[in-house]
Amino acid sequence: MTVLVLGGTGEARELAAALVADGMTVVSSLAGRVARPRLPQGETRVGGFGGIDGLADHLRTQAVRAVVDATHPFAATISEHAAQACGRVGVPLLRLARPGWASEPEAPRWHWVDDHACAARTAAGLGRRVLLTTGRQRLAEFTGPLTDHDVLARVVDPVEVPLPARWQVFLDRGPYALAGERELMERHRTEVLVTKDSGGDHTRAKLDAAGALGVAVVVVRRPAPPAGVRTVSDVAEARRWLSAPPG
Ligand SMILES: NC(=O)c1ccc[n+]([C@@H]2O[C@H](COP(=O)([O-])OP(=O)(O)OC[C@H]3O[C@@H](n4cnc5c(N)ncnc54)[C@H](OP(=O)(O)O)[C@@H]3O)[C@@H](O)[C@H]2O)c1
């Protein structure tokens, strides 16, 4: 009997390590988006399941006893698929999602938007020099509104879409510290920072640096989680739930 951890995050790796230490059989699932992923302890499988049907089949054939959806808060499709597939097959599902940044003291001063397209339009009106940290997959939504801006796009893997001439790409991977974030923004003379509400500590230093330097901040709100799925915000709670999952 196996616990399936839908991963791709630091919390997922932390949970896998804790469960391996507890002596459980853990399989972590990665989408396969990142060229050189940090691998969790325990077994790993890589690649999509083939939609809800494929995931439901996987749960049945692999005798999965419980699923923890520890994917990134913006990975809305796989979270919805997990809710549907687990519901169909009758496998208990827990969502492990780190808290967002909405309760940070500076949050009321940030420009909160509902999606990436709105973030692009909002950033375009706030300044000419933009530090874009929303990831590689949605860059195409920013290129139109920010064509003539001096954009520094920080991404983990090389970008595959054509980018405007004034844009620069900077390959890097967190965690990031305040001094480095401050130095980056000073060197680029950043006027606007664009981020998702990813939450957690690995990438939050940019928000502190922006606050200290008077940089405007645009934050994309999280997508709504699937209805009716129990959610916890830390690994210890997930571990407790797994010690006696419902059903
Ligand atoms: N979105 C972000 O900002 C972000 C940031 C950091 C890390 N990540 C990680 O990167 C992965 C992909 O994120 P995304 O936003 O592209 O996902 P997504 O849009 O929610 O999912 C798209 C498809 O990718 C496959 N998939 C996603 N996560 C998977 C997983 N853990 N294991 C197996 N298949 C998975 C599924 O394919 P099938 O339908 O074929 O099963 C899913 O339908 C996730 O694991 C997430 O935790 C995402």
Image (tube, grey):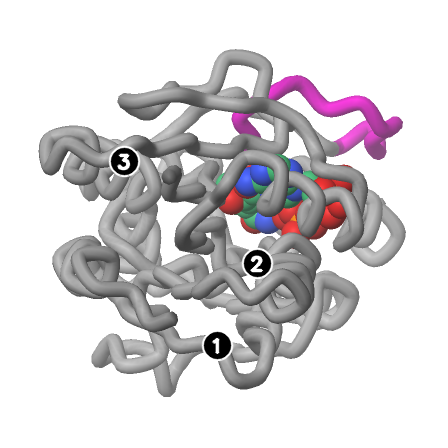
- Which quadrant would residue 153 be assigned to in this image? top right
Which range is magenta? 151-166
* 210 shown above or below 153: below
The residue labelled by disc 1 is 229
Q: Quadrant of ligand 1?
A: top right
Q: Label 2 amino acid?
A: Phe
Q: Quadrant of the N terminus?
A: top left
What residue is shown at x 17% (from left), y 57% (from top)? 243
Which one is in front, 50 or 212? 50
Which SS class for mark 1? loop
Disc 2 crowd, CA 10 A, few/some/many (<14, 14-19, 20+): some
Question: How far across and down, in percent of the image, does residue 156 sit?
Answer: 53, 26
Residue placed farthest to the top in the image?
36
N-terminal of the two: label 2 or label 1?
Answer: 2
N-terminal of the two: label 2 or label 3?
Answer: 3
Image mark for residue 74:
2
Disc 3 crowd, CA 10 A, few/some/many (<14, 14-19, 20+): many
Image mark for residue 16:
3
Q: Label 3 amino acid?
A: Ala
Question: How far across and down, in percent of the image, does residue 111 sit?
Answer: 52, 78
Q: Taking 50 as reference, is 183 left or right?
A: left
Magenta stretch contains residue 178: no
3 and 1 marks in contact (CB < 8 Å): no
